[in-house]
Amino acid sequence: MPGSAATGQTDRFSNEFNPAIGGALDFLLTALDGDGEDGLKLDLRALELSVNTWIDPNTWAYGVLVGQPEDGVSLEEAAVVYQGFGGHSTLRAGRFFVDFGKQMQAHEHDLPTFERPAVLRGYLGEELGGTGVQYDNWFAAGDAGAVRFSLGLFQNLANAHDHGHGDAEESATEILIADYKDAQDLSYTGRLTGFHDAGENGVLQWGLSVRGIPSFAFESTLSDGTVLGSEELANHVFGADLTYGWNDDTGLKGWTVGGEYLVFQGDIGAEVDDNGTPANFADDTLQVLDSNRSGYYLWAQHAWDQYHSAGLLYSEFEHAEAGSPKDSEIVAWYSRNLTEMSRLRFGVRYADSDESGDSTALLVQFTNFFGSHAHGVNW
Amino acid sequence: MKLLHALLAVLALASPSFADKLKVVTTLPDLADLAQIVGGDQVDVTAICKGTENVHAVRLKPSHVVATSKCDCFVQMGLSLEHAWVPGLLKTARNPRLEPGKPGLVTATAGFAALDVPESLSRKEGVDLHPEGNPHVNLDPTAGRHMARQIHASLCALRPEAKAKFDANLKAFETASTEAEARWKALAGELKGRPAVVYHSEFTYLLRSLGVEVIATIEPKPGVPPTPGHLAEVLATVQKRAEAGQPIAVLTAAWSQGSAVDRVAEASPVCKKVVLASMAAEGTSWLANMEALHRKLAQAYGVQYPVPDAPGAGESQDQ
């Protein structure tokens, strides 16, 4: 039946199918063979529900609720975005993933592989959401390029990995950030990135990122209840990233290659020193590691049509601990897009750790998107 | 007097109608061609698509964002054809001249009677489902005039002082389009009832205008790749129809010519795979692309084109 075409597309949040409510289901099957744990794990990683809506012509808002069988339901993002300043500037307020590198803003199921590279997990956490405000702007750099920058201030950008300890014995060392603090003690982020045409079918992006925690304390509770602490600490993570993407003339076949180098600097870890007397807690001290550690990841992915792609990622980083123990991982994957809304991914991951030995995991991921699942320009 | 001439010269240079061209960005090259035809020397036109892509999957480049942020007029097809990337582009470009309701934002299919409007909106009916109907209007033989008029209305609103030029340009295009339509209608008389298999539904407008019968669609639903069961049904349908000995065109775009298309094309000696452009290639006119599509279809069925003695038979613009 013919109908009248009255509208085009002007809005990312089409509510033709529902009121811009969308979601994702992400399953992961892992078969692990390692020096530590072994066996199969079937995990519903997330049921994500998202809502996007305009509040007025200059303001839109969104929220993302994530449910996980083991962790319950959490509010992953909830933010208001104001764009009424004119020009290309934006102010975002609320809770949201911070602007760091190319991969930290994305939700896990939107990544090209199963999870974020090991160096990002090690230095920034599996996810880096913060409650705060972020200003964002971009300007043209000639006719074929653009430069974007953002500055963010957050209540707390610490994550469980900041103390630099991965094993259970040392996990009693925690990061503490005051609820109330001076403005200069707020956590912050900054990013500067350039986005340029590279030939007829290519795009080149470079970026510099920083995440700073200017004031925090380490605290460790000993077995006898004694609390050791160290205050007035600060650390930063700096990142430099480069990504090149190329598509053939159909737009469906292409390559993406990229990498990011990170430096973790400042008061990056703390360990309890028992002074050689494990049974005597009275002489224990908390040793803060004030140093630099670094790591990187490199990855490449090839899509040979709209349904099939495969990739390889290598990541290596130094732990924020004395002696700089290293972790590395190599991940290979094949993704089969069953449709635009459904994806099956197979992979293998080999991880080698100076602390916990090596392991091999076979991975199967099944992801479904439903309702509205819209993203803006990825830069 | 010299002073007056100098003053007029300065005014002429300063006048936006003469000194600055309207910057027009279009999604498809077809629209770029029409904008250039209607706008003439008053416009600078940039197309985002090259003409060979799957229009649902276009990788945006920085130059596209910059051009869209600076343009006076943005022309899209609409009907959700470019829904995967135009909303993000417009949101990022943040160009106040392109806000909905302003003359700078043109939806070329606005007011066009779309085909295949779904009766219910559910993903069960297809992943690549367009709520307002089949969006591949650019391949309708009558669409050129419709889209050109939409662009004309916008340009007249943006630069009323050049309306006479735009009117004349539109009229010239409509004359050329009408002549071409006469040739295409003559071909329709030859192709009516001929069987075709398509991969996706991008050629619906073209095929219906010619009366070509689509006996099977390789995608079971829009945006869903063929399942083994569905492909077996398609092959059975094609083999049965092939018994009549009539040529069957297996039509595909450049992006969708995969193994499933090849299997169908090899199902019978009477089948012939034909790769058709779903939009004009960069630098090719809309009329020339439509002419090429008609010629290819005629060749696929062994019909002479232009049809001898048809009106406008000598005016073919094929390249």
Image: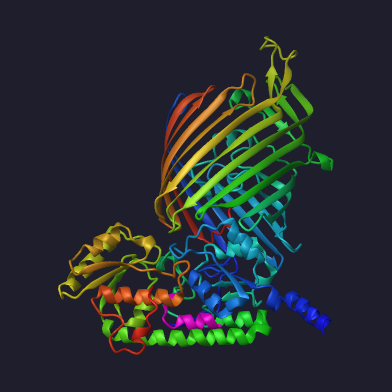
Q: Residue furthest top?
A: A276
Q: Position of B123 compared to B90: left or right?
A: left
Above or below, A318 against A378 in this view is: above
Q: Is residue B151 left or right of residue A236?
A: left
The spot of residue B199 in percent (x, y) is: 33, 66
Query: Where residue A20 sits: x, y (%)?
Result: 58, 64
Q: Nearer the viewer, residue B39 or B57?
A: B39
Q: Is residue B163 above or below residue B214?
A: below
Image coordinates of residue B150 in percent, x first then y, are 56, 81
Q: Residue furthest front?
A: B2
Q: Is residue A353 above or below residue A279?
A: below
| Image coords of residue A136 (percent x, y) | 71, 53
Which of the two residues, A165 or B242, is positioned nearer the viewer here?
B242
Assess whether residue B295 is covered by the magenta stretch.
no
- Image point (46%, 28%), residue name: A37
Can residue B145 be found in the magenta stretch? Answer: yes
Direction from residue B312 to residue A284 in the image, left or right = right
| Left or right: A137 as drawn, with respect to A45 | right
The magenta-colored residue range is B137-149
Which corner quadrant of the image does residue B260 belong to? bottom left
Q: Quadrant of the N terminus of chain A?
A: bottom left
